[in-house]
Image: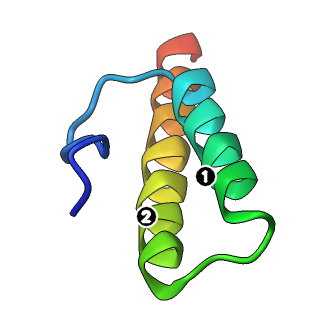
Amino acid sequence: MSPDLATPGSVRSAAEVNEQIRALWLRAGGSLSAQEREQYELLVVEWAAAIRGRVVTAA
């Protein structure tokens, strides 16, 4: 796994994770390799957790 990926339980904001997702797509030129797809999936899970955490906090 890439060292720039956060470990589970990360406290990064959804905006930070979203920026990393965008950067991944830009580097990949719109077509992800198998390794990039794995990174993308992990980032999306982290982003969703950050969004859920923000919604729970707001409630």
Q: CA distance from mark 1 to mark 2?
A: 8 Å
Q: From the viewer's perspective, is 24 left or right of 45?
A: right
Q: State the residue at coordinates (30%, 40%).
A: 4
* Location of residue 35 by image quarter: bottom left
* Residue 12 vs residue 59, the one in the foreground: 12
Count of numbered marks: 2
**Image position of 15 with respect to 1: above or below:** above
Residue 39, horizontal then vertical, whole percent: 43, 64
User: Hey, what amino acid is under mark 2?
Assistant: Gln
Q: Name the mark nearer the viewer: 1 or 2.
A: 1
**Image position of 15 with respect to 32: above or below:** above
Residue 38, horizontal then vertical, whole percent: 43, 75
Which mark identifies residue 38? none
Please, which residue is most extreme toward the top here?
A: 58
Please, which residue is most extreme toward the bottom here?
A: 34
* Residue 11 vs residue 56, the one in the foreground: 11
Residue 42, horizontal then vertical, whole percent: 41, 61
User: Hey, what amino acid is under mark 1?
Assistant: Leu
The earlier-in-sequence mark between 1 and 2 is: 1
Task: Tell me the crowding category of disc 2: few under 14, some 14 to 19, or many 20 or more residues within 10 angstroms, Cα based.
Answer: some
**CB atoms of marks 1 and 2 within 8 Å:** yes
**Image position of 14 with respect to 4: above or below:** above
Please, which residue is most extreme toward the right here?
A: 30
Q: State the residue at coordinates (57%, 17%).
A: 59
Q: State the residue at coordinates (21%, 63%).
A: 1
Which mark identifies residue 24? 1
Numbered disc 1: secondary structure: helix
The residue tagged 2 is 39
Residue 8, horizontal then vertical, whole percent: 20, 47
Q: State the residue at coordinates (80%, 68%).
A: 30
* Location of residue 51 by image quarter: top right
Task: Tell me the crowding category of disc 1: few under 14, some 14 to 19, or many 20 or more residues within 10 angstroms, Cα based.
Answer: some
